[in-house]
């Protein structure tokens, strides 16, 4: 079936092992019955998962992250869809500049964005506010939605739109009935990708969250720098599970290979 | 058409991009400018930031202080090594993947690339489990009769975890350029008696070079500014630029100094990216004409 030689396949097996080993180990250690970071040897135990749910700070951080990712992904979609339509269907001076600007947060280090927003929020006196944290996340995840919506809006067959228009459909009806259904995979896929990225974001968030608005990755980061016990593995396993669930959804609505390596 | 006429024509376009533009101006352009200004502000440990007085002190200590110099140097060699390893592992792996049959190809592609979507904190924690004093790697070493080694909190741990995080960013562009490769060209060269090595060197590599180079750029940029990996696996003493900025902001509370380092990091990153681009363009021009 494959044209790869045995040496190539061995190399491939090692790369796959390398990529999966840390994730598999985390999931196994999460089930340890011991007090130390060890692989479960005698039996699997759920005690560290129970420990996570007894920690109010982790539960709160989890809800913070969930609400944050939901709001930020929704806002980012509401902003990115019109912008993508503007870029793909209208000719106007500054169009390619807009395109570059809107995608730029992907290239600028999150750390630099984090300190820049910390300064802005401190001057405005809103540091640690949950509302502004949402907007900070919207900024870093909008490019992901934009990219997917752009990909599905470019090269769209517009004859259906023209037909609807000539039959007297208004702008809003046109968008709702014709355009949106056609770009829906890009919109839904973009929303999910934005959700995952917001849920995982740590570098920017660590600068602009307060103890009350701490997100789960920030809570985990701080916890891991102070102490390491199997509870950390249990939280990590839960995060891996949730991410896997979102990825399955993403695969259903848009196609995981299309998200990861572009159109085939 | 005059500029005004085209601006009027594109009114709809501006209207639709207005929300995005407002967001980017308020939360990207303005904060970056504020940070640039902040990096010139005078700072005093007793009175804090003086917004009305300006100085070049932060930049001169950045250039003169061996402490900063050492951290920048370390960040760049760690990122460079990470990039090199990503090329050495990622390019052959992308090639092997592209030669697999269905369904294995998409299964393994997804398996290798999806760790990209899992929180970097989780992945760093996974590596600390593997590389810890009594982690799996050391247990295996002992079982094989070796003596345990200190792996965690060393540059080695940081590089390994960075390669793990960055590898997908190398595989994706190489994979994309491999998709454009015409298998007939490879077969033609083989049937004309070229060895596999020659085909690799003369047919495959030149065509995937743009992918390799753009991957290199992404990996280096992301590695040089990575924060969570050195923060969790480098320990307190092994500072990189990102963890240094974090310390300046959140423990030293010397924001102007932190801002100066952040500006320097951003500029160095941009400089390397631009000169890398220039160099590649120059080479392609030469080879084409």
Image (cartoon, coloured by chain):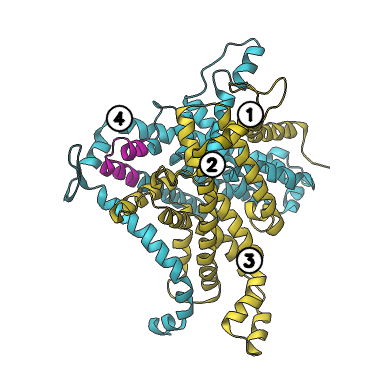
For the residue carrying disc 3, how many other residues have a C-alpha within 10 Å: few (<14), some (14-19), or many (20+)? Answer: some
Badge 2 or badge 3: first in the primary sequence:
2
Q: Quadrant of the N terminus of chain B?
A: bottom left
For the residues marked 1 and 4, what is the alpha-carbon distance in whole angstroms?
Answer: 45 Å
Instruction: Looking at the picture, tell me which residue is in the foreground, A5 or A180.
Output: A180
Instruction: Looking at the picture, tell me which residue is in the foreground, A40 or B109.
Output: A40
* Discs 1, 2: same chain: yes
Q: Which mark is residue B67?
A: 4
Label 2 sits on residue: A59
Residue B254 in magenta stretch: yes
Chain letter for mark 2, please.
A
Mark 4 element type: helix
**Chain A image colour:** yellow
x and y percent of residue A35 in the render? 59, 21
For the residue carrying disc 1, how many other residues have a C-alpha within 10 Å: few (<14), some (14-19), or many (20+)? Answer: some
* Discs 3, 4: same chain: no
Q: Which residues are magenta?
A: B244-264
For the residues marked 2 and 3, what is the alpha-carbon distance in whole angstroms?
Answer: 37 Å
For the residue carrying disc 4, how many other residues have a C-alpha within 10 Å: few (<14), some (14-19), or many (20+)? Answer: few
Mark 4 or 2: in front is 2
Mark 1 element type: helix
Label 3 sits on residue: A152
Question: Which residue is pictured at 45% across the width and 49% down the height?
Answer: B279
């Amino acid at each position: 079936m494959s044209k790869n030689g045995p040496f190539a396949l061995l190399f491939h097996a090692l790369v796959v092992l390398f990529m999966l080993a840390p994730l598999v180990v985390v999931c196994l250690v999460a089930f340890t019955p011991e007090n130390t970071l060890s692989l479960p040897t005698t039996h699997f135990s759920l005690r560290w998962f129970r420990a996570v749910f007894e920690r109010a700070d982790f539960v709160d951080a989890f809800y913070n992250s969930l609400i944050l990712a939901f709001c930020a992904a929704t806002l980012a979609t509401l902003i990115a869809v019109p912008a993508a339509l503007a870029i793909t269907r209208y000719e106007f001076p500054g169009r390619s500049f807009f395109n570059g600007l809107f995608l730029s947060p992907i290239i600028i280090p999150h750390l630099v964005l984090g300190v820049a927003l910390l300064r802005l929020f401190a001057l405005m006196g809103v540091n640690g506010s949950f509302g502004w944290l949402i907007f900070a996340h919207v900024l870093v995840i909008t490019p992901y939605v934009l990219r997917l919506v752009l990909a599905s809006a470019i090269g769209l067959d517009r004859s259906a739109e023209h037909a609807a228009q000539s039959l007297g459909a208004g702008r809003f009806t046109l968008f709702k009935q014709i355009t949106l259904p056609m770009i829906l995979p890009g919109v839904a896929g973009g929303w999910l990708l934005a959700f995952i990225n917001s849920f995982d974001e740590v570098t920017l968030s660590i600068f602009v969250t307060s103890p009350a608005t701490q997100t789960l990755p920030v809570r985990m980061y701080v916890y891991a720098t102070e102490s390491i016990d199997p509870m950390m593995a249990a939280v990590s396993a839960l995060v891996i599970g949730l991410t896997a669930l979102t990825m399955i959804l993403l695969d259903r609505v848009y196609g995981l290979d299309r998200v990861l390596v572009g159109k085939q | 058409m005059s500029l005004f006429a085209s601006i009027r024509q594109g009114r709809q376009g501006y209207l639709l991009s207005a929300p995005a533009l407002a967001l980017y101006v308020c939360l990207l352009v303005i904060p970056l400018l504020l940070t640039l200004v902040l990096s010139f502000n005078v700072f005093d440990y007793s009175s804090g930031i003086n917004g009305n007085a300006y100085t070049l002190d932060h930049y001169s200590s950045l250039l003169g202080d061996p402490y900063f110099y050492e951290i920048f140097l370390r960040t760049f060699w760690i990122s460079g090594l990470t990039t090199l390893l990503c090329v050495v592992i990622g390019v052959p792996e992308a090639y092997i993947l592209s030669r697999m049959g269905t369904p294995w190809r998409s299964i393994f592609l997804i398996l290798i690339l999806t760790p990209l979507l899992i929180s970097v904190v989780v992945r760093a924690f996974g590596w600390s489990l593997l590389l810890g004093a009594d982690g799996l790697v050391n247990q295996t070493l002992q079982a094989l009769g070796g003596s345990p080694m200190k792996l965690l909190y060393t540059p080695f741990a940081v590089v390994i975890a960075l390669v793990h995080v960055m590898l997908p960013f190398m595989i994706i562009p190489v994979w994309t350029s491999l998709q454009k490769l015409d298998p007939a060209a490879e077969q033609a060269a083989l049937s004309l008696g070229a060895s596999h090595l020659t085909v690799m060197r003369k047919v495959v590599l030149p065509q995937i070079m743009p992918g390799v180079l753009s991957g290199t750029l992404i990996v280096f940029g992301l590695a040089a500014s990575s924060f969570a990996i050195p923060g969790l696996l480098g320990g307190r003493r092994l500072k990189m630029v990102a963890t240094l900025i974090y310390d300046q902001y959140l423990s030293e509370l010397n924001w102007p100094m932190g801002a100066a380092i952040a500006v320097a990091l951003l500029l160095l990153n941009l400089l390397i990216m631009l000169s890398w681009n220039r160099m590649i363009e120059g080479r392609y021009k030469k080879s084409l004409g």
